Image: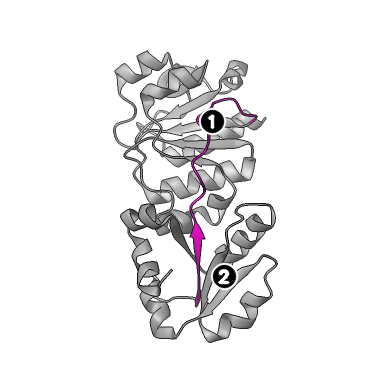
Amino acid sequence: MKLDDVKKLHQKKYRSQFGFYLVEGEHLILELDKACTAGYTNVTITLYVTPEYESWAEQLDSQYTVKPVSQRQMSQLSDTKSPQGIIACVPIPGKAPASGKSSARCIYLHEVQDPGNLGTILRSLAWFGQFRLLLSPGSVDPYNSKVVRASMGAIFHVPVELDVSLSALPGRFSSIACLDMQGTNISDSHFRDFDCYLFGNEARGVPAQALVECDAQPFTINGSGKIDSLNLASAVTLSVFQLTL
């Protein structure tokens, strides 16, 4: 890929067109290397490095094409104020199979908008393991650089399926749970009995009619009652923790 095309990958339309996204910084590249060793991708990854990172990059376990660039070129590739000097051009994983039958529980997010929330959710799912993430149309792109950074490398360890409509859920899953202020406490043993766990948009939640059509069973996270809601990422994290007990 030409350097001018790599620069375009900060825009979603070009990520979709070329099928690649960018991963920047030493920590994320080390996480990527770990994931590649475990089979994350069999496509060659290109590392763009400034001179001080050439020898560092060549010592990584996985096979990469290392391309030296100048500091000026690196600043053009990076979307951070102080580029670290190493950026990987990584293939976006192929479309996940449209099946709910898996050993992994499915977490479905409806129109999640905040990159920080999505990155934090990915970290939680990777930490606890055995979770698959489904994103509705209109959700923030998980390969957005802000999400990738916020995930701290978890994006490489969690299977992600894009553009899954709410209307498709009843046909894929025999039992669906959702979070609701009036539901049963998630500490109830039946909370573990579902195939898919549905979480709504940060401000609007999930359309009421969609919950009826999905026959989603409501559960809640008990709190003090002093505030009206819990942050989406916190709600998902508490729920997946409960599911692993």
> In the rendered image, which quarter contains the C terminus?
top right
**Number of residues whose C-alpha sits closer than 10 Å to that of mark 2, classed few (under 14), some (14–19) or many (20 or more):** some
Question: Residue at (64%, 78%) from the top-left corner?
Answer: 56
Query: Mark 2 belongs to which amino acid?
Result: Glu
Question: Residue at (40%, 28%) from the top-left corner?
Answer: 225
Start-end of magenta stretch: 85-103
Query: Mark 1 belongs to which amino acid?
Result: Cys
Question: Residue at (37%, 29%) from the top-left corner?
Answer: 165
Residue 212: x percent and y percent? Answer: 36, 14
Which residue is more in the foreground, 232 or 174? 174
SS at circle 2 = helix
Instruction: Provide the residue designation for mark 1.
Output: 106
Residue 19: x percent and y percent? Answer: 43, 54
> In the rendered image, which quarter contains the N terminus?
bottom left
- Residue 65: image quadrant is bottom right
Residue 87: x percent and y percent? Answer: 49, 70
Instruction: Provide the residue designation for mark 2.
Output: 26
